Amino acid sequence: MRNGPFWWILIAAMLLIDLYVFFSVRSLFVPGAKSRTIFTLAYWFFSVMALVLLIFVLPYFQASEQHKALRSILFVLVFALFLGKLIAAVFFLWTICAVPCNGLPVKYFHLTMKSAKSQALQETAYPGLPF
């Protein structure tokens, strides 16, 4: 490999994104279900195969025309798998950050509307008193 540190950083990033997306999607399955086991096996099979291709197969292809085409196809498949996981991770992170913030405007406006409503009720109930 010509650029060793880049590949190790890329592999570490791929593993972290793999773990994050795996646990996010796995949480959607019912614990103990057969579909969860099938998903786990299939997910890690494809992830490990992509990493094996990236580490052991792609750097050592010969420079002939047939090997260039095959290398390009395999690299595109690995990149598409990684890009799909990266996009999923962005949406999962957005959901984690956005959901807790959704209640803030409701709480704030609910309190202001409630105080305005109670003030209006007090004014109508006791018109002469300065509450």
Image (spheres, rainbow, N blue to C red):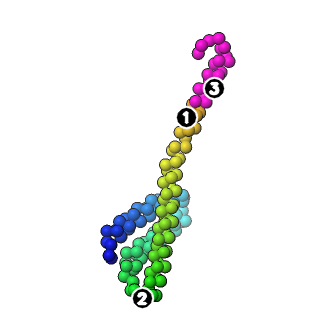
Q: Three-letter amino acid code at disc 2?
A: Ser
Mark 2 neighbour density, 10 Å: few (under 14) some (14–19) many (20 or more): few
Does 7 sit above or below residue 16?
A: below
* Location of residue 52 in the rendering, given as x and y in whole percent from the top left corner: 40, 75
Residue at 34 percent across and 68 percent down: it is: 6
Depth order, front residue of 56/60: 60
Does 83 sit above or below residue 62?
A: above
Marks 2 and 3, the one that precedes in the sequence: 2
Can you tell which mark lies on residue 68?
none
Marks 1 and 2, the one that precedes in the sequence: 2
Are the residues tagged 1 and 2 within 8 Å (C-beta)? no
Q: Mark 2 highlights which residue?
A: 64
Q: Is-magenta flag for residue 125? A: yes
Depth order, front residue of 16/59: 59
Does 61 sit above or below residue 6?
A: below
Q: Three-letter amino acid code at disc 1?
A: Tyr
- Quarter of the image for residue 54 reads bottom left
Residue at 42 percent across and 88 percent down: it is: 64
The quarter of the picture where the N terminus appears is bottom left
* Location of residue 4 in the rendering, given as x and y in whole percent from the top left corner: 31, 72
Are the residues tagged 3 and 1 within 8 Å (C-beta)? no
Can you tell which mark lies on residue 117?
3
* Location of residue 36 in the rendering, given as x and y in whole percent from the top left corner: 52, 64
Q: Three-letter amino acid code at disc 3?
A: Lys
Region rendered in magenta: 112-131
- Name the dominant secondary structure of the magenta segment: helix
Q: CA distance from mark 1 to mark 2?
A: 66 Å
Q: Mark 1 highlights which residue?
A: 108
Q: CA distance from mark 3 to mark 1?
A: 14 Å
Farthest-out residue, top: 128
Q: At numbered mark 1, what does the secondary structure look like: helix, strand or loop?
A: helix
Residue at 51 percent across and 44 percent down: it is: 100
